[in-house]
Amino acid sequence: MRKDGEDWIVVTDMKRASHNHEIGNYNQWHTSASKLNEKELQTVELLMRNNMMPKHMLDHLKKENPNNSSSIRQLYNAQRKILKRQMGDLTAMQYLMKLLMERKYITWWQKEGDGDSRVLSQLMFAHPECVELLNLFPYVLLMDATYKTNRYYMPLVQVIGVTSTGQNFHIAFAFLKDEKKESFVWFLKEVRRILQGVKPGVIITDRELAAMNALEDVFPGIPHMLCRRHINENVEVYLRKLTGKKSFWFTFKKRWSSIINAQTETEYMEKVKLMEAAWHRVPAFIQYIHDTWLTPYRHKFVSAWTKEIKHFGAETTNRYE
């Protein structure tokens, strides 16, 4: 372009007439051209029934059709449209209850309010086959909760069991109204009910104080351990925030592991003293380690104490991941 008086004119320089890059894929940048066709939508619906992850769905579609230029966002949009069509006039809760009934799940729920204002506040569900497995293998229970991952901001709690061959199975799920102790008490009481008098060998959780307090009320005397992976993640985050350096965690990790894996109380005390001497220049971090983890909870995750519990090698809740 070159200005000629009051106007702009196009000037062609034949010496620079070629592009310095490949011509872009038109479909890649125009959603109308790269949206899924009807056959692909049917494929997505089938894959959704088989619980395939979206990124794997997209890989499958591109292998089936090399010319497919859909993005992951378009796939998400397609999934929402399919789900909306399947739901029809039902609300999200009505559709969930419909699916649970069709798949023969056992359900428990709580309602709040009076008359027409009564609403479902908490919902728990479990499959009968998993309940049977729980009564066969009640030895190790893993419990975890995820927060703020759904539109209603309801905590989703789940409990997993472990068979004698090391295979895990989902026992129960629950949407709770909040993260308070009373909500976890309601959930754990229902879990205790389906145990039919059988006592679990050990229950492993992260350091969710409301859940831990609820466990003491509902399962008194049952050994409780803390997930080592969650502990390590918390310690790493605190150290990085305190020092501003991510590399410090790799330096501390080996010493921290020696404390966690100490086999006797004497060895534990020796490793703690070595840690204190090595990190004496960061007193706030040493204080955090003692006040948050070692003093109140060492018996829940340090081997010197947990080796007395029959946890069959389960020391984390990472079977959820």
Image (cartoon, grey):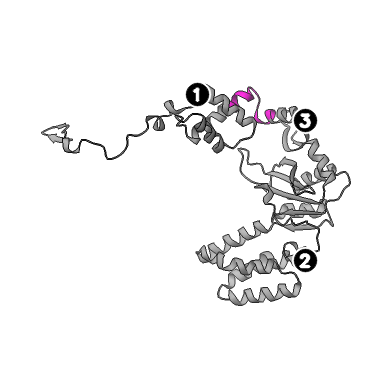
Could you say where residue 253 lies in the image, as x and y percent from the top left?
A: 60, 65
Could you say where residue 320 lies in the image, as x and y percent from the top left?
A: 67, 47
User: As displayed, is residue 37 above or below residue 252?
Assistant: above
In this image, 220 relative to 147: left or right?
A: right
Instruction: Check disc 2 and give the amino acid type.
Output: Trp
Label 3: which secondary element: loop
Q: Give the residue drawn at x 79%, y 39%.
A: 130
Front position among marks 1 and 2: 1
Among numbered discs 3 and 1, the one appearing first in the sequence: 1
Front-most of 190 and 194? 194
Label 3 Cα neighbours within 10 Å, binned few <14 / some 14-19 / many ≥20 = few
Total marks in image: 3
Check disc 1 and report the residue beneath it: 37
Check disc 3 and report the residue beneath it: 104
Structural distance between the alpha carbons of marks 1 and 2:
59 Å
Structural distance between the alpha carbons of marks 2 and 3:
42 Å
Label 2 Cα neighbours within 10 Å, binned few <14 / some 14-19 / many ≥20 = some
Q: Give the residue drawn at x 59%, y 37%.
A: 53
Instruction: Check disc 1 and give the amino acid type.
Output: Asn
- Magenta span contains residue 117: no
Predominant SS of the magenta segment: helix
Front-most of 183 and 169? 169
User: As displayed, is residue 232 above or below residue 211?
Assistant: below
Q: Are marks 1 and 2 in contact (CB under 8 Å)?
A: no
User: As displayed, is residue 27 above or below residue 234?
Assistant: above
Mark linked to residue 305: 2
Label 1 Cα neighbours within 10 Å, binned few <14 / some 14-19 / many ≥20 = few
- Magenta span contains residue 87: yes
Magenta-drawn segment: 82-95
